Image: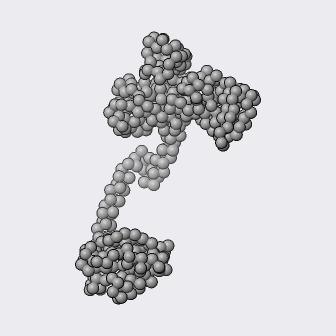
Amino acid sequence: MRLYWEHPYESEFSARVLRAWSEGKKHFAVLEQTLFYPTAGGQACDTGVLGGVRVLEVLEEGKAKGDIVHVLEAPLPEGSEVRGQLDWSRRYRHMQRHTAEHILCQAFLRAGGWEVQAVNMSNPICTLDFAAEPEAAVVQQAEALANWAVYANIPTRSFFIEEHELGQYPLRRAPKVSGQIRIVEIEGWDMVACGGTHLWRTGEAGPIKVLKFERHKGGTRVYFSAGWEALELFSQEHAVLSRLGERFSTQGLEVERPIANLREEFYRLKGENAALRDELAERYMRDLLAEHPGHKIAALVPAVILEAVGKRLAEWPGTLALLVAPGEDKARFVLVKHPLHPLHLPTFFKETLQALGARGGGTDVVMGVLPPTAVHDALDAFRRAVAEGKG
């Protein structure tokens, strides 16, 4: 028996274990009755304790018809009487999410004729998927309508009908089950077939906040939060805005302008920095070519322009260069040559630098790292190899 349908606000119950079994390290139990809601209809399952054993997950063997299976941390004796206790905070939040989902789905139907295609309420930020094109005006109106329904504090109720009675009820969408069908009604607002847990009145679901919407699989995905979880999100966002306001010496809701100014200044300085790095790399390249007329170069180069200098040097005929940027934990290096230089760089790298602890890779350019203590040994090994005619 599914007690959660008739007693969604209760969190404790007693029941007899009808079936119990284990599969490896997983343990399962079916009870004669349960308050534990199984994962279904976009709503996550309840968790809690059953006979002193943690309930890790709850499943249903058949959609709205089969047994409810409790996945347990440890086995329970078959035939025993057990006491169950839900994680009430989790249950209540799930009821807030699910009731808000019903409210919002009807609101979108009224605002733009949008019919929901899929829902996910497994997280504090829930989603609704619609086939319609994204439209800000519809989203804004739907949010306003949903919160009107919250403020109206409308009663909700659930009841069962037979499949042949469906034509007598103005359901928002066709049911996905047959036979006896459970209906959830928000009086005068919404009516739909549903097997989830819901609040007694819509006022408990608020506030409902649409967080964002985006194009998704040719339609629109809407993200929302409701109830305590929406309040917690508002509190977190308010704290962030307050801190930002303090840092920018302004009110939290007025931080957009100073942040935009800061962003503009950042990109301006970033551009200036890139131009200065290019200029510095060009000067380093020309100085190195002047110091090494034969274009066989072993030199220390600042890390910020290491690759840029190497790229520029590789454009000069006959060039073979090892550039190293020292660092505290590791040194970076670039080994480059002109494209027409016949040397096979990977082989030269293995024969010259690997024995010193160098690690790297590449074909026309070999890049990698060196132990900081091996910087000068690496430069000397390069010079010796060139002097011996290997480069």
Residue 320, horizontal then vertical, whole percent: 31, 79
Residue 26 in which image quadrant: top right
| Picture colour scheme | one colour
Question: In the rendered view, does 139 fall on the left or right side of 198?
Answer: left
Residue at x-position 67% and y-position 37%: 22
Q: Taking 121 as reference, is 2 above or below it?
A: above
Residue 310, horizontal then vertical, whole percent: 32, 74
* Residue 349 in view in this figure: yes
Q: Which residue occupies the foreground of this view, 318 or 252?
A: 318
Q: Taking 146 as reference, is 333 above or below it?
A: below
* Residue 313 in view in this figure: no
Residue 180, horizontal then vertical, whole percent: 54, 16
Q: Quadrant of the C terminus?
A: bottom left
Residue 135, horizontal then vertical, whole percent: 33, 33
Q: Which residue occupies the foreground of this view, 211 or 313?
A: 313
Residue 108 in which image quadrant: top left
Q: Which residue occupies the foreground of this view, 157 or 216?
A: 216
Q: Residue furthest bottom?
A: 387
Q: Taking 156 as reference, is 207 above or below it?
A: below
Residue at x-position 44% and y-position 28%: 104
Residue at x-position 50% and y-position 21%: 177
Q: Which residue occupies the foreground of this view, 260 or 220?
A: 220
Question: In the rendered view, does 133 fall on the left or right side of 69?
Answer: left
Residue at x-position 65% and y-position 27%: 34
